[in-house]
DNA sequence: AGTGGTTCAATGGTCCAACCAATTTCTGCA
DNA sequence: TGCAGAAATTGGTTGGACCATTGAACCACT
């Protein structure tokens, strides 16, 4: 009854190229930053046209797996393995204020869960690493009077890593990148993040105490203050003209 | 100090092609399913080579925005607008049991937040729609003795929609798709989801009562039962050989 | 009317050969 | 030795050609 007749796969040249390339990367144990063979060499070795190689590489480039530098070569940007799943997301209209708030809601969800998982599974080493980042950030906050966004980000990344689930870092990093492409200095609010500052330590305390629900609650508070900051900034300067 | 000197744009043919194409789609008000101009026509109109057009379209295809059918044409798969942000995610090794558990942790994070937002912002119409989906699902559960995964999914989608943030539905839908490409019947556990069934109504009750924290807690419970089911299934049948 | 086969134009997929533009490497002069 | 310019390397683009698939039009036969 189910009429299971999936369409047959007759040709898939570029897909085959990608699979072969993934196998090559695996065999050669290539890591991020390393250079992979020339398009011309790949075309010759794989017995396909250079055009086909280019289409395949264009796919990977679009997925952020690879970076092409004219005159230099093609370089790996991330670890690739043959058993990889791709989840391209297109966020329609994410570059206005409402879009920013929407991405922040996603971040709130992930941040809270990551903190909770971290409190459950964080080992001594991971917790020590988080504390190290926290100290660095607090020091930067003191000396530079608030401008500590870079160190702030590193603290959060340490939390994501310690959650034991790399997806958290992957997703939020992708959002962070988008975020900063359009909002280098979020809304021009100079003391951005002041209000959220103390919560970094309370989050860490709850994680160190292996208290998942406490960590979750503190993370929610932190994001709430960031949202308030943003709303304040939006109220101050009209930003309907920013894009 | 900031040295704001954006690199000049000497060459970006395919990017320009995509921008032009996005503008075209907008102007012609093309929606999903509609066919867009031939590669040859685009090449001629835009005064670029057909190969360049193809590279640009390959990008969009990789992002899932467009579908190419040989002999037929190129068709839109999703709404596309010039101000769109792309967030390609590659989930390394997402097709084994550990990968499944990792995606489930992401879903737990988003599910809880969506339920909470829903309780805060859900209007009468949205809540009624959720209840309708819930009734359908419970009816299917009774008549077909448990096999209600499709209706189950529709219920959750209604919650995501009512959250007021389309990103929830986008992200979880993308994961759901991947999920099902490799795990058509999750782990072969036939009565999958039995344990999570009652929580659907408790979640709805908390949403209808506009109790965000209660909704969040019930959503967390639901995902916890799903995780237990999965662990049970994994313990029963050795699945290290599944891919 | 409907079924199946054939033809044919349209369209995406692949290939080739050449050239352009950016980068890197080599070379020879000061 | 240092460095400017030439040469080789490499990704980016072009134009043209051919193949494979699709879908519509047409036709013969039942």
Image (cartoon, coloured by chain):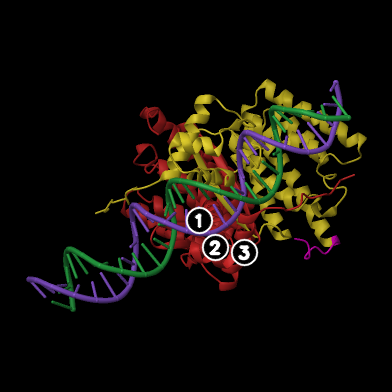
Chain colours: A yellow, B red, C green, D purple
Q: Circle 2 sits on which residue?
A: B43
Residue B164 seen: no
Is the magenta region chiefly helix, strand or loop?
loop
The structure residue drawn at horizontal position 75% and vertical position 34%, both measured from the top left corner, is: A155
Depth-wise, is mark 1 or mark 3 nearer the camera? 3
Residue A124, relative to residue A230: is it above or below?
Answer: above
Judge from the rendering whether residue A46 lies leftward or rightward of residue A167; answer left or right.
left
Quadrant in which residue C5 is drawn = bottom left
Residue B188 place in picture, x, y as percent: 35, 38
Rendering coords of residue C10 (x, y %):
41, 68
Asked whether residue B49 is drawn in magenta, I would say: no
Q: Which residue is mark 1?
A: B157
Helix, strand or loop at mark 2: helix
At label 3, counting other C-alpha atoms closer than 10 Å, the crowd grade (few under 14, some 14-19, many 20 or more) is: some
Specify the subunit that label 2 lies on.
B
The picture places residue A87, in percent across and down from the top left corner, at: 53, 46
Q: Residues within 10 Å of mark 1 (few under 14, many from 20)?
A: some
Work out how far the residue at label 2 is from the one at label 3, CA to CA, in angstroms. Answer: 12 Å
Q: Are marks 2 and 1 on the same chain?
A: yes
Q: Quadrant of the C terminus of chain A?
A: bottom right
Residue at screen point 78% across, 61% down: A242
Crowd around label 2: few <14 · some 14–19 · many ≥20 (10 Å): some
Image quadrant assignment for residue B121: bottom right
Residue matched to label 3: B20
**What range of the chain is rendered magenta?**
A236-243
At which x and y percent is residue B82? 64, 62
Return the residue nearer the eye: A219 or A6. Answer: A6
Query: Are labels 2 and 3 assigned to the same chain?
Result: yes
């Amino acid at each position: 009854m189910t009429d299971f007749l999936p369409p047959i796969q007759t040709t898939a040249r570029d897909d085959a190229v990608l699979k072969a390339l993934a196998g090559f990367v695996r065999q050669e144990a290539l890591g991020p930053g390393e250079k992979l063979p020339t398009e011309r060499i790949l075309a010759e070795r794989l017995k396909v046209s250079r055009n086909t190689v280019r289409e395949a590489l264009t796919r990977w480039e679009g997925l952020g797996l690879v970076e092409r530098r004219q005159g230099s070569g093609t370089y790996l940007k991330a670890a690739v393995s043959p058993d990889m799943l791709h989840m391209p997301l297109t966020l329609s209209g994410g570059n206005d204020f409402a879009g920013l708030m929407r991405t922040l809601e996603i971040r709130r969800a992930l941040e809270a869960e990551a903190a909770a998982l971290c409190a459950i599974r964080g080992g001594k080493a991971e917790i020590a690493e988080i504390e190290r980042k926290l100290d660095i950030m607090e020091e930067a906050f003191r000396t530079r009077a608030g401008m500590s966004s870079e160190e702030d980000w590193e603290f959060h990344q340490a939390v994501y890593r310690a959650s034991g689930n790399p997806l958290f870092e992957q997703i939020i990093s992708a959002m962070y990148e988008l975020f900063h492409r359009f909002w280098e200095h979020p809304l021009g609010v100079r003391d951005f993040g002041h209000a959220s500052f103390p919560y970094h330590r309370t989050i860490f305390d709850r994680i160190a105490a292996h208290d998942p629900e406490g960590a979750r609650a503190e993370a929610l508070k932190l994001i709430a203050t960031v949202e308030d900051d943003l709303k304040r900034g939006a109220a101050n300067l009209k930003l309907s003209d920013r894009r």
